[in-house]
Structure formats: structure tokens, C-alpha cells
Image (cartoon, rainbow, N blue to C red):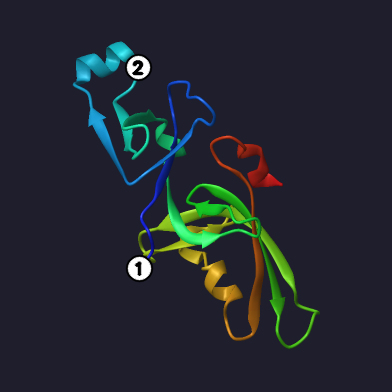
Amino acid sequence: MRERKIRGYAVEEMVGSQWVYGFGVYAVEFAEHYAKEIGRKRDWHLYTEDAGIVRVHEDSIGDYIGKKDKDGNEVHEGDIVTLFCQENKGAWNDFKVTGVVTYFEQFAQFLVKRENSHPQLGFDLFELCDHEDYELLEIEVIGNIYENPELINS
């Protein structure tokens, strides 16, 4: 069973990194009149061991998927990664794929979604690279959708 870790980008300025890591997240829903007044429907909070409860940006929240990249960095949902795979039976079909780590409910798993790919047609690149004919050589986190959305199209 994988360890449950969640990360989020703190709204308030933090000492060191704005990224905080915790074990639970929840949303505080606002009444309609207050939401109109402040310009948002909810606030998201991350439970952390070190900083307590921290308000984070909703689109920055992502689960740890239980894998680390080539440099030992934990891979989280929302990370932009490059996968390097090798065919076991020859080098002519080696490939590299860049995409966003995404959790798909209908498959109950994390996938690497390439730009403009349809979720129903998606496939688990982690599993594909670990298939008997291929080997996942390495994963490299190159950014995340919150801080580096421009990398998705690269």
C-alpha cells in the first residue's frame, strides 16, 4: 500500500518553499452571498505535520503516486514528467513521452496524459513501460501544471 502524501502550494507566503506536504485536504464551502463578495466559492486547506492547517491553491493540490524520479524527487499528481522507456528486444523502438501525471477515476489509477489525448483512449504509461516487452528506464519530473503550464506543450 502506498504512503498517502498530498502537496499543495500555500496561499500565504511561507519561509523557504511555498509547497507544503500533508496527509489530508478539505474544502470550506462559502454561502452564496459571501462567495460573491470575496470572488470564490471555497477555500482549500491541507493538514500538515509541521505547519498545521495551511490554505492552498485548489489547482496545486496533488497526491503522491508512490514513485520517485531519477533524482529521487517524489512524483505527484499534476507533475509534468518525461518517461524514458526501452524495448527489451531491440533498441529500434525506444521512446520518450512527456505528459501530466493525472488520476483517472474510471481506471482507478494514475496515468501520464499527453496534451490533447482523450482520457478514454489514455493508457497507463507506467504500466506500459513495465510491460514484458518494455522497461521503464527513468522518470524525470520537469515541472508541474501549477508553476510551469507552458511545459505541457513542449
Q: Check disc 2 and report its element: helix, strand or loop.
A: loop
Q: Position of residue 45 (x, y in %)?
A: 32, 33
Q: Residues within 10 Å of mark 1 (few under 14, many from 20)?
A: few
Q: Amino acid at mark 1?
A: Met
In the displayed orientation, state which residue is furthest to the front: 50
- Count of all numbered marks drawn on residues in the image: 2
Q: Is residue 36 above or below residue 57?
A: above
Q: Amino acid at mark 2?
A: Gly
Q: Position of residue 99 (x, y in %)?
A: 61, 54
Q: What residue is pinned by disc 2?
A: 39
Residue drawn at x 55%, y 68% is 126
| Residue nearest the observer in this picture, 26 or 20 | 20
Residue 32 image-quadrant placement: top left
Q: Is residue 26 above or below residue 131?
A: above
**Residue 153 circle label:** none
Q: Is residue 92 left or right of residue 82?
A: right
Residue drawn at x 48%, y 54% is 102
Q: Is residue 38 left or right of residue 104?
A: left
Q: Is residue 19 above or below residue 113?
A: above
Whole-angstrom CA distance, mark 2 to mark 1, is: 40 Å
